[in-house]
Amino acid sequence: MTRVTQGIEDGKVLVVDLDGTLLRSDMLDESFWSALGRDWRVLLVAARGLGEGRAALKRRLAAVAGLEPATLPYDPRVVDYVRDWRARGGRTALVTASDQSIAERIATHLDLFDEVHGSDGTLNLKGPIKAEFLTRRFGAGGFVYMGDSTADLAVWQVAARAVTVNAPAALRARVDALAVEAEHLDTAPVLLSAYVRALRPHQWLKNILIFLPLLAGHQFDMGTLMLAALAFVAFSLTASSVYVLNDMIDLAADRAHPRKRKRPFASGAVPLRHGMVMTAGFFVLGAVLGLLVGGAFFWVLMGYFALTTAYSLYLKRQLVIDICTLAGLYTMRIVAGGVATGIPLSVWLLAFSIFFFLALAAVKRQAELVDAADRGTLKARGRGYNVADLPIVTMIAISAGYVSVLVLVLYVNSPAVVDLYHTPTMLWGIGAVLLFWITRTVMITHRGWMHDDPVVYAARDRLSQVCLLLCLGFAVVGAL
């Protein structure tokens, strides 16, 4: 006879916790980040709620979060456990410290519970308070309790049996020391790879732009290279802190996306609370390295962080402003490289970068709109564009790309080129390659084959790699 059957035959109620047990996340964190993703002013709401107590904070956030129960990261093994209990004729209850309104919506969606009890805006149903509530409701030893945290020890002490979910070894030992039978479930092993993926190291490729002033100015001495390398690391660490922040803000949009829903925070593989620590930690590391590079570089880095954060909180939902901001963020990497190495930036380089990266930003939005159209939705989730805007966004991408090539060929005829290149006419080859690459990239995106950020796609695409090598070849031959 299995333990599940024993509990049912004894008439015990299976009481299930929500945060970290039924759900691979915490609803307080979920509510905060979901609400913040909708409106940055929720920070003020959270501050007021926190002053009134934890239960009041949960109620305030629940009212503005707009959570979608169908997309939340449930633990499938826990869901199966509860479903099996009911299939055998047992009663179940969802009892959580999360707000009652959220608990009811989740219970309605899952249709697995006979009772639902949560915090009511005044009483935070957690720890000893939850234990007292369950004792009054079902009697001491009248229920089997499934939980995951140290706060649940008070509940397990008065339960007929304890079921832990993904509890650390130290907590398991404390539960085993209680005078109750214990069952331990391992449903979601902690994977270091999930934390690495949350940092998006593949996106660090964009920070190679920091080396562009060095390459354009033909300054390859060891001191300049070391400063550029240190600036690259500082920018990468800071960028990762913002990527983590952005993924937490974008939870709802990511979970509605067929591929992005597998991201570490959207899937529940990495707790949101860990994400908060990661954001702060990598920001501090990046800032410290930025100071080592130099004061001017540090302020450019802080400007990048501030603009990227503003983009995540607000600007990315604003029509046209979003792609202009993205183009500016790319260009800031080039500015950072110039500031870090002390290499003056030419007007030609800045003009080329603005138009070229505006084209890439537009391609990114084009890809999202094509994907939305293929899925039958009218709007890209979390963006300011409708599918009907697709032709205009495509025109922005291709026209901005062509203008960047025009700036490049005009640069070839400028006096500055003569000082840097022995055969400046070879640079025309770069213009021809870019003209082909931009046109092909827009066409690929139009056909729905662009599933990544265009820079990341280019790094993985064999023909794009050939185009890069050709551009470098023309530059080297021109300089010889």
Image: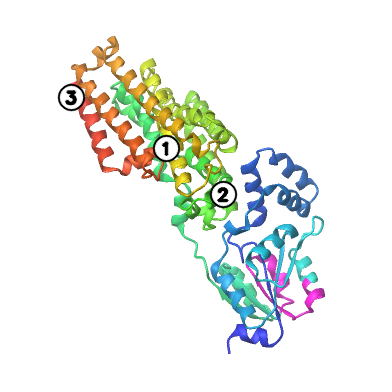
- Residue sitting farthest toward the top: 415
Q: Is residue 118 left or right of residue 401?
A: right
Camera-nearest label, 3 or 2: 2
The amino acid type of the residue labelled 2 equals Leu
- Residue highlighted by disc 3: 477
Residue 192, percent across and down? 46, 57
Q: The disc labelled 1 sits on which kind of residue? A: Val
**Mark 1 vs 2: CB contact within 8 A:** no
- The numbered disc on residue 233 is 1
Question: Which region of the structure is painted magenta?
Answer: 134-159
Local packing at callout 3 (Cα closer than 10 Å; few below 14, some 14-19, many 20+) is: some
Residue that appears at 33% across and 29% down: 225
Question: What secondary structure is found at the residue carrying circle 2?
Answer: helix
Q: Nearer the viewer, mark 1 or mark 2?
A: 2
- The residue to which callout 2 is attached is 251
Q: Residue at x 51, y 65 (%)?
A: 188
Q: CA distance from mark 1 to mark 2?
A: 27 Å
Quadrant placement of the N terminus: bottom right
Q: Is residue 62 above or below residue 206?
A: below
Quarter occupied by the C terminus: top left
Q: Nearer the viewer, residue 64 or 168?
A: 64
Q: Secondary structure at mark 1?
A: helix
